[in-house]
Amino acid sequence: MNNIYVKTKEKKYPIYFANSFNGIEKAVEENDLSGRKLCIITDSNVSGIYAQNVKDTLEKYFESVFVYTFDAGEKSKNLNTISDFYSFFLENHIDRKTVVAGLGGGVCGDMAGFAAATYLRGIKFIQIPTTLLAQVDSSVGGKVGVDFKNSKNIIGAFYQPDFVYINTETLNTLPEREFNAGMAEVIKYGPIYSHNFTEYIADNKKAIADREYSALKHVIKKCCKIKAEVVSKDEKEGGLREILNFGHTIGHAIETKMNFTLLHGECVALGMKAVFNICLKRGTVSQKEYDELLSLLEYFNLPLNISGITADEIYSQMFLDKKVKNNQLSFVLLESYGRPFSTTNVDKEEIYSAINAVLR
Ligand code: NAD
Ligand code: GLY
């Protein structure tokens, strides 16, 4: 299956790539997880499509299999839902030998992982991502958590899964808007890693949009490879890992301020346009590279502008982000295309100009 491995100080785990759930039994056996209880956590959209299949496939490998379904969507990503998970765990005598599986998008994986990290001080956890965003980003690297009050992902932990099983076939049922939102995170890997990857996306954009297996597999694997490399060098975001937050400083603020009416990937697209604007003005990216980014975002129907929100609102919201250090905003910018760096050295005027670039 040609796996990719994430290697942190304490753990090494595989990311499997497949176009069915058939290989998941092998993954369970290879990672020595059979014979335990399995608790599949999924959301109300994914449950009816995939939970039974995964349950049937894995039933003979586990002592018993439980499925818990929560209401789909970012609005569920909070401590109340986590508390419901804990109640379900208690009712079903979930013990230290149990494996928790997050079957769904980033909301599901982040919450299943957080519950696994905290219940009984940590139980086994596997990721079975079913959105493009989760397959290229959130299921890899062990960031788990929930939103709290007005802040995105402000409560959480680093908790690596035992494996990640990516079945690209699940993307066939993903609504187009969600698929496109995932493309924002895919597109993000170009500026932070290499222009070759952006070229591949641009050259194959139709095949990707048509969800053709070979193009999709190529981009998903490449994103996972980049992410695995970054996380393996800097698991806890002491420095390098911050590059994965490209476009997120302004993006997260928009996401929260718009009350989650825009999808995470859509806000990342807006955030990327905004920081590209800073880089363009600083002369570290060319007009051609800026236009290329916008045209890719546009091709995947990602928003380039928003209304109904002010620059002041976005600016103040940014200070509630977990990336704020000593009350200073932190941005990922580009020294040149493919060479990101993290900095707090961005003045207020530049920030307002970047925000205004995405306001209608
Ligand atoms: P999501 O989990 O809400 O999934 C999007 C929608 O697609 C939901 O309605 C879901 O029910 C539905 N869905 C999922 N898979 C489907 C399928 N195969 N077919 C049909 N419908 C399907 O959102 P997301 O975009 O996957 O993830 C966004 C979340 O991920 C945000 O909360 C964000 O903060 C988080 N995130 C985390 C990390 C990380 O490193 N942990 C990285 C990026 C984003
Ligand atoms: N999505 C950012 C990270 O995993 O660090």
Image: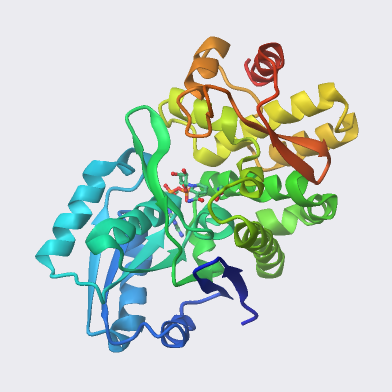
State the quadrant of the C terminus.
top right
Going by the image, does 310 lie left or right of 150? right
In percent of width and height, residue 337 lies at 83, 42
State the quadrant of the N terminus.
bottom right
Going by the image, does 268 lie left or right of 192? left
Give the vertical position of 166 relative to 131 (above or below).
below
Give the vertical position of 336 relative to 228 (above or below).
above
- Give the colouring mode of the picture: rainbow
Residue at the left extreme, as displayed? 91
Give the vertical position of 192 relative to 248 (above or below).
below
Residue 303 appears in view: no
Seen from the viewer's position, the closer of residues 24 and 46 is 24
In percent of width and height, residue 69 lies at 26, 57
Seen from the viewer's position, the closer of residues 291 and 159 is 159
* Residue 15 in which image quadrant: bottom right
In percent of width and height, residue 160 lies at 46, 63
Going by the image, does 297 lie left or right of 323? right
User: How many dots with numbers?
Assistant: 0
In percent of width and height, residue 352 lies at 65, 14
Looking at the image, which residue is at 42% across and 59% down? 159
Looking at the image, which residue is at 46% across and 77% down? 21
* Residue 347 in which image quadrant: top right
Give the vertical position of 198 relative to 275 (above or below).
below
Residue 335 appears in view: yes
* Residue 353 in which image quadrant: top right
Going by the image, does 45 lie left or right of 162? left
